[in-house]
C-alpha cells in the first residue's frame, strides 16, 4: 500500500527478504519482483494472490471473505500506537484553519469512497460537527493520497484526509512539498493496514507466510529492511478489530452524515 516511486528499492528489499524465507520454507515459483500495476484497491483479492497489503475498510466490505490476514505492521510514524494508525486532515501550511470546524465551506479532496483513512475515518470525525448537513463547498474523489497532498501543497484544494503513514513517507521522500502542508486534526484510530493472502492459499502456506513475516520483524539481519518501511514489528490483529471499522460507518449514518459532502 505504501509504494511511492521513491520507495521501489525499499519495497524490493522487503520482498527479497520475504521471498528468501518462503523459499527456505519450501515454496517455489515465487515471483522475483513485486507487481505495482494493480490499483491500491482492486476489484477483488483472487486465488492467485499470495501476498499483498490491503486497507482495512475494503477488507471488511468489498473484500469480505476473500482474504486471510497475516499480520499488521507497527509503524514508526506519528499517530501510530502499536498495530494502529489513523487518518489525518492535512491543510496548507498557511491555511487559516485551526480546527476541523474551520474547514466548513472549503474545497475538499479525498482518494476513494472505498478507503478507510480517506473516507470512513474522516466521515466519522466530520459527522460529529456536520449536523447532518453538507459541510464542504466541494468534495472530489481523485484516487490518490499522494496526489491529494500535492494538490493541497499547490493550493488546488483546501484540505485532504490521508493515512498518517502515507504522510510520514511523503514527508521523508518529498520534504520540499511537505513543508508547504501541516496536519490540522486526526481522525479516530484504526488497526493498521494488514498484510494478507487469498482465502484460497493453503493453510500450511499461510502459516509459513506468518512465520516469515514474524522473522523479518524481529531478526537483527532484517533491521535495514524494517527501517526502510518504518516497520518496528509485525503482530497479529484479531479480525474483529477490522470489523469494528463498520461501527464508524454505522455511527456516521446515525448522525446523519452517511457520505462526505
Image: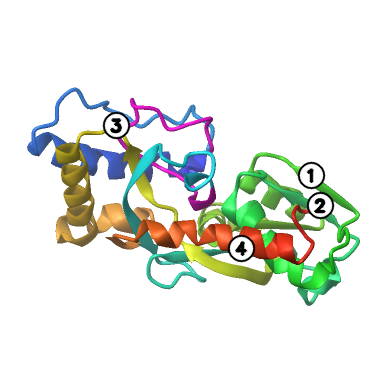
**N-terminal of the two: label 4 or label 2?**
2
The picture quadrant where one finds residue 86 is bottom right
Mark 1 and mark 3: Cα distance apart in space: 36 Å
Q: Would you name the residue on which mark 2 appears?
A: 157
* Occupied quadrant, residue 153: bottom right
Give percent across and percent down for residue 171: 56, 59
Q: Front-most of 223 and 129?
A: 129
248 part of magenta stretch: no
Q: Quadrant of residue 32?
A: top left
At label 2, counting other C-alpha atoms closer than 10 Å, the crowd grade (few under 14, some 14-19, many 20 or more) is many
Which residue, given by chain and number where applicable, does mark 4 sit on? 248
The answer to which of marks 1 and 4 sits earlier in the sequence is 1
- Percent x, y of residue 57: 53, 50
Q: Is residue 105 left or right of residue 243?
A: right
Whole-angstrom CA distance, mark 2 to mark 3, is 42 Å
CA gap, disc 3 and disc 4 = 29 Å
Residue 200: mark: 3
Mark 4 is surrounded, within 10 Å at the Cα level, by few (under 14), some (14 to 19) or many (20 or more) other residues, namely many
SS for dot 4: helix
Disc with the residue nearer the chain's start (1 vs 2): 1
Label 2, secondary structure: give it. loop
Residue 242 left/right relative to 204: right
State the residue lying farthest toward the bottom: 98
Name the foreground residue: 18 vs 189.
Answer: 189
Which residues, given as a range, are shown in magenta?
41-57
What residue is at 23 percent from the left and 51 percent from the top? 213
Quote the CA–CA distance across marks 1 and 2: 10 Å
N-terminal of the two: label 3 or label 4?
3
- Give the labeled residue for mark 1: 140
Q: In this figure, what is the number of numbered marks?
A: 4
Residue at the (63%, 64%) spot, across then down: 88
Nearer mark to the viewer, of 1 and 3: 3
Amino acid at each position: 500500500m505504501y509504494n511511492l516511486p521513491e520507495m521501489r528499492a525499499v519495497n524490493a528489499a522487503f520482498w527479497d527478504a520475504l521471498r528468501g524465507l518462503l523459499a527456505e520454507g519450501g515454496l517455489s515459483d515465487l515471483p522475483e519482483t513485486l507487481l505495482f500495476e494493480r490499483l491500491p484497491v482492486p476489484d477483488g483479492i483472487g486465488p492467485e494472490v499470495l501476498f499483498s497489503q490491503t486497507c482495512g475498510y475494503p477488507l471488511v466490505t468489498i473484500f469480505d471473505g476473500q482474504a486471510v490476514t497475516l499480520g499488521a505492521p507497527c509503524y514508526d510514524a506519528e499517530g501510530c500506537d502499536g498495530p494502529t494508525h489513523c487518518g489525518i486532515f492535512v491543510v496548507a501550511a498557511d491555511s487559516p484553519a485551526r480546527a476541523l470546524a474551520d474547514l466548513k465551506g472549503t474545497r475538499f479532496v479525498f482518494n476513494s469512497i472505498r478507503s478507510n483513512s480517506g473516507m470512513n475515518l474522516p466521515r466519522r470525525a466530520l459527522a460529529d460537527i456536520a449536523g447532518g448537513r453538507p459541510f464542504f463547498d466541494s468534495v472530489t474523489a481523485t484516487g490518490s493520497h499522494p496526489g491529494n497532498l500535492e494538490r493541497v501543497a499547490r493550493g488546488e484544494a483546501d484540505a485532504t484526509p490521508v493515512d498518517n503513514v502515507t504522510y510520514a513517507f511523503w514527508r521523508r521522500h518529498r520534504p520540499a512539498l511537505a513543508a508547504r502542508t501541516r496536519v490540522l486534526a486526526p481522525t479516530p484510530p484504526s488497526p493498521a493496514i494488514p498484510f494478507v493472502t487469498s482465502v484460497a492459499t493453503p493453510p500450511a502456506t499461510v502459516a509459513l507466510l506468518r512465520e516469515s513475516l514474524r522473522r523479518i520483524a524481529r531478526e537483527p539481519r532484517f533491521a535495514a529492511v524494517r527501517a526502510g518501511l518504518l516497520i518496528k514489528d509485525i503482530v497479529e490483529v484479531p479480525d474483529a478489530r477490522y470489523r469494528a471499522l463498520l461501527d464508524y460507518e454505522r455511527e456516521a449514518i446515525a448522525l446523519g452524515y452517511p457520505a462526505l459532502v
